[in-house]
Amino acid sequence: MATGSADSPATLYGPASLVLGTVALIAAVFAGFIGIAIPLLFGSLAATFALLGLAHKLNRGQCAIGLATGSLSVLYPIFLVAALSA
């Protein structure tokens, strides 16, 4: 059961993290063309919103997917830069 009201702005943490995580993951795949700033920014925002949504216990499925995609989109460019600079 959700602990917040249905009209609370906290209900948007799940969809926001899902959308930002998806966009960040797509941008991370094309990091060689567009750079790594967008995946790092959007991925960290997705992870932050996902953790806030999980703390409020609202839209837990969307928050979990947003956390996974946001984390992957932050880690992928970092590993890519580390692998190419070695």
Image (cartoon, rainbow, N blue to C red):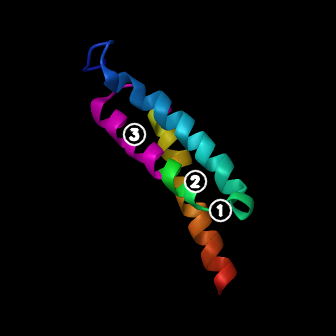
The answer to whether residue 20 is magenta is no
Q: Which mark is residue 49?
A: 3
Q: Position of residue 85 (x, y in %)?
A: 65, 83
Neighbour class for label 1 at 10 Å: few (<14), some, many (≥20)?
few
Q: Which residue is mark 1?
A: 35
SS for callout 3: helix
What is the C-alpha distance between the residues marked 2 and 3?
Answer: 16 Å
Q: Amino acid at mark 3?
A: Phe
Task: Give the position of the N terminus as an image quadrant.
Answer: top left
What is the C-alpha distance between the residues marked 2 and 1?
Answer: 7 Å
Q: Nearer the viewer, mark 2 or mark 3?
A: 2
SS for callout 1: loop
Q: Amino acid at mark 2?
A: Ile
Mark toward the start of the polypeptide (2 vs 3) = 2
**In contact (CB < 8 Å): disc 2 and disc 3:** no
Residue extent of the magenta highlight: 44-62
**Residue 78: quarter of image:** bottom right
**Residue 39: quarter of image:** bottom right
